[in-house]
Image: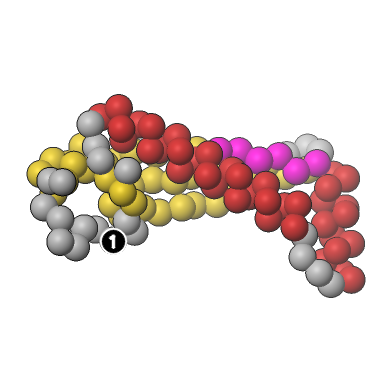
């Protein structure tokens, strides 16, 4: 599957547009992780555990979107965008990562 953040594929002839496909992934952060992360932010340094979790969640969202595009017969997704939303929560935060774009088929 080919991914592009642009609305076209340079040098490729798009022969079919299947429409928008999406993929979502949620990460929950509990109060203890938030506390540790806050301490790291105050004393300096990176909160690498959160970074890893966000990277994994982003990959899951993209894989979910890719699977939907593949099921439609697409071999590329153009106009790829990622959106991050903090949904809040009672014991911490829940972050929703959404990947979306247009599923297309190009001549190979």
Judge from the rendering whether residue 90 lies leftward or rightward of residue 62; answer left or right: right
Label 1 residue SS: loop
Q: Is residue 74 above or below residue 83?
A: above
Instruction: Decide if residue 86 is in sight here.
Output: no
Whether residue 27 appears in magenta in the rendering, the answer is yes
Towards the viewer: 9 or 99 = 9
Q: How is the image coloured?
A: secondary structure
User: Magenta stretch?
Assistant: 25-30
Q: Quadrant of residue 39?
A: bottom right
Q: Identify which residue, 60 or 38, lies in the foreground.
A: 60
Q: Residues within 10 Å of mark 1 (few under 14, many from 20)?
A: few
* Residue 79 spot, x, y in % from top left: 31, 54
Which residue is denoted by mark 1 in the rendering? Answer: 6
Is 54 situated left or right of 59 in this image?
right
Residue 32, given in percent of the width and then of the height, sits at 88, 45
Is 107 inside the magenta-drawn segment?
A: no
């Amino acid at each position: 599957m080919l991914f592009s953040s642009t609305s076209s594929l340079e040098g490729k002839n798009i022969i079919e547009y299947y429409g928008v496909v999406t993929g979502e992934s949620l990460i929950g952060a509990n109060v203890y992780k938030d506390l540790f992360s806050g301490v790291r932010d105050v004393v300096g340094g990176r909160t690498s555990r959160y970074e890893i979790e966000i990277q994994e969640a982003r990959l899951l969202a993209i894989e979910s979107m890719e699977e939907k595009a593949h099921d439609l017969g697409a071999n590329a997704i153009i106009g790829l965008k990622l959106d991050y939303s903090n949904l809040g929560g009672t014991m911490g935060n829940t972050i929703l990562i959404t990947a979306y774009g247009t599923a297309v088929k190009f001549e190979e």
